[in-house]
């Protein structure tokens, strides 16, 4: 059987130790790295390309779901956490398993069996569209921050600091604090992840932070222009304009 | 807003009682002088109605100068000034009314002038009575509030012990230690049990000596220290004189738990929590300070813990206590100041 290369990401040392202990009896699993926070987990996964990632949710720097968004979806992820309320979200994000701390060695082995089954199947696991990962949130819960990969580093943008997003093929460009960042995602996926009371789709290709709109001017017969506080001009479609009026009327 | 305004039916009843008092005074007035019933009623009813409104004012005054928070001398001064103003106002309105009505009933203004001393004393006494009743009302209200807040704190403390963040992670650490270091596993088990037992016991009481609250906080920190290891560093700077002072139960442990949860647990390299306590002649000052990462992932920070601490301080000590939060970009500090009492 193929040896599986694993990474453990958890900020508590004892939590990492118990995984290491349980894994010590498994000949076909090799721990290649241990990471104490989200940034290091992303970096290690991208550098070492493991088969398997044991991932805690509440961690410094980046939480488990943000890590998941920034890594290659072919990695099998097993969430290991004390929280039970994220289980649905984890499976929506195609996690292989969800272990609740503390767990028995038996429960852990069952989890490894799931992992092995996944790697034993002839077809490689289907890569998960990134939008699906982002969509895996409880209803009424929206992203407060966006994570983007900036070369080997990770950049975090607070939702309140995002001016607007523009669709660019498979990417969106995000404008924040005078800089532009590229994120692999569709604009519709981003729209559904952000609070609809704060971000408005003014055009097929543009999602704008409501707070940044200084005024709206008519452009051609059926189009308008949203003028942002910094002077940026964003096209507004007829549907976008009516959405804007609806939202502006409610606040 | 005055609680009477919340129920208009009660408020109308209240006004009706004053109108009735006006009638009664109007009816008995002729016995003490040569004034007609009708004239007396025409003046007394509006005056009593006005007095009814004026007597609601002590509610706001009593709330802004609570009994135990202000020296009795200044309390007396405030209320005397209030009483003089209220009486002067009501009598002035009565005088104006009497002189206006003297065109219908000649000589009424002189009769009113004659009755002014008695009326002034009556109005002033009524106003003072209203002030006293308002204090009594506020006292009952605040003790009821303190009671329900204490119960809420107890429930919250119980909930905090079964919250996944703390309890399940601690049990996971114990699970890891059973094979790594059985002695430490046992130690941590006992530490957790001690903390649970102590917080149940403290939760039943209203106030406790500072030393007991501190002991509970230390038990909590002992468990967290086993989880976080070197990431959690502690500096305790507590004046030993604090040990015997009185403190509402479970007031400090939630502050320290906040510092761990939102500060240390979210920092990769960890940080230092500084707990300090000072006691002087008049007051006790206690603070918890921690660093935090402003760019940490968003957690469910509901702030109930801090809100509860503030509300309980206020319910117990009124404006004599205060909770101050100093937050800079990477540093958070909560300071409690409350009256010095020995338990």
Image (cartoon, grey):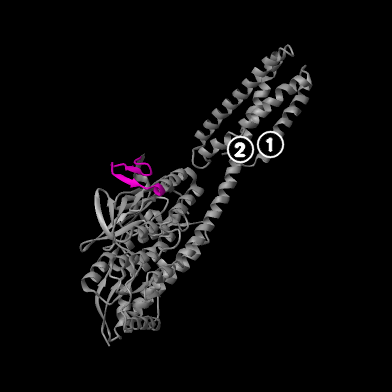
Residue drawn at x 61%, y 30% is B54
Question: Can residue B236 be seen in this snapshot?
Answer: no
Q: Is mark 1 on a helix, strand or loop?
A: helix
Which of the chains bears the disc numbered 2? B
Percent position of residue B177, x then y: 34, 77
Q: Name the residue under label 2.
A: B132
The magenta span reads A218-240
Residue drawn at x 35%, y 64% is A131
Which image quadrant for residue A87?
bottom left
Q: Name the residue under label 1.
A: B12
**Is B212 on the left or on the right of B178, as rendered?**
right
**Is B196 on the left or on the right of B183, as rendered?**
right
**Is A99 on the left or on the right of B155, as rendered?**
left
Percent position of residue B204, x then y: 53, 61
In the rendered image of this protein, does residue B10 appear above or below residue A206? above
Percent position of residue B228, x then y: 32, 67
Residue drawn at x 38%, y 53% is B241
In the rendered image of this protein, does residue A177 appear above or below residue A56? above
Percent position of residue A81, x then y: 38, 71
Question: Can residue B169 be seen in this snapshot?
Answer: yes
């Amino acid at each position: 059987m193929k040896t599986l290369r694993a990474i453990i990401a958890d900020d508590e040392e004892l939590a990492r130790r118990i995984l290491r202990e349980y894994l010590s009896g498994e000949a076909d699993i090799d721990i290649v790295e241990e990471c104490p926070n989200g940034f290091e987990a992303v970096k290690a996964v991208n550098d070492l390309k493991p088969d398997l990632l044991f991932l805690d949710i509440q961690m410094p720097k980046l939480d488990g779901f943000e890590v998941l968004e920034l890594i290659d979806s072919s990695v099998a992820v097993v969430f290991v956490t004390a929280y039970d309320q994220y289980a649905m979200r984890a499976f929506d994000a195609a996690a292989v398993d969800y272990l609740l701390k503390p767990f028995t060695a038996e429960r852990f082995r069952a989890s490894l069996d799931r992992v092995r089954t996944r790697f034993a199947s002839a077809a490689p696991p289907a890569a998960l569209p990134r939008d699906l990962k982002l969509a895996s949130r409880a209803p009424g819960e929206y992203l407060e921050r966006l994570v983007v990969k900036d070369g080997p580093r990770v950049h975090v943008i607070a939702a309140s600091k995002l001016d607007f997003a523009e669709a660019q093929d498979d990417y969106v460009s995000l404008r924040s604090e005078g800089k532009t960042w590229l994120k692999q995602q569709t604009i519709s996926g981003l729209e559904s992840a952000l609070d609809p009371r704060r971000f408005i789709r003014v055009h097929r290709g543009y999602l704008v932070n409501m707070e940044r709109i200084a005024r709206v001017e008519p452009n051609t017969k059926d189009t308008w222009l949203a003028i942002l506080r910094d002077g940026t001009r964003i096209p507004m479609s007829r549907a976008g304009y009516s959405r804007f009026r609806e939202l502006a009327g409610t606040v | 807003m005055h609680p009477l305004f919340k129920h208009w039916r009660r408020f109308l009843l209240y006004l009706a009682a004053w109108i009735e008092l006006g009638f009664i005074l109007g009816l008995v007035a002729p016995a003490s002088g040569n004034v007609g019933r009708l004239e007396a009623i025409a003046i007394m009813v509006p005056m009593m109605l006005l007095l009814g409104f004026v007597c609601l004012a002590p509610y706001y005054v009593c709330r802004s100068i609570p009994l135990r928070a202000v020296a009795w001398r200044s309390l007396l001064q405030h209320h005397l000034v209030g009483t003089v103003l209220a009486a002067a106002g009501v009598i002035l309105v009565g005088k104006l009314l009497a002189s206006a009505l003297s065109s219908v009933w000649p000589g009424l203004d002189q009769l009113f002038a004659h009755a002014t001393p008695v009326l002034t004393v009556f109005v002033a006494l009524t106003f003072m009575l209203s002030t006293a009743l308002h204090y009594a009302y506020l006292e009952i209200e605040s003790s009821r509030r303190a009671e329900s807040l204490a119960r809420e704190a107890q429930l919250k403390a119980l909930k905090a012990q079964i919250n996944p963040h703390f309890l399940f992670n601690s049990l996971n650490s114990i699970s890891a230690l059973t094979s790594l270091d059985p002695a430490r596993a046992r130690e941590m088990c006992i530490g957790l049990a001690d903390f649970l037992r102590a917080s149940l016991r403290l939760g039943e009481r209203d106030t406790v000596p500072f030393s007991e609250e501190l002991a509970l906080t230390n038990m909590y920190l002992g468990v967290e220290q086993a989880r976080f290891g070197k990431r959690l560093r502690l500096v305790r700077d507590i004046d030993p004189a604090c040990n015997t002072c009185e403190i509402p139960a479970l007031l400090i442990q939630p502050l320290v738990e906040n510092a761990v949860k939102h500060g240390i647990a979210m920092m990769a390299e960890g940080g230092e929590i500084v707990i300090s306590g000072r006691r002087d002649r008049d007051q006790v000052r206690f603070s918890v300070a921690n660093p935090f990462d402003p760019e940490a992932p968003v957690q469910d920070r509901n702030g109930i813990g801090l809100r509860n601490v503030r509300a309980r301080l206020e319910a117990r000590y009124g404006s004599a206590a205060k909770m101050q939060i100093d937050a800079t970009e990477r540093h958070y500090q909560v300071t409690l100041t409350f009256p010095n009492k020995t338990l």
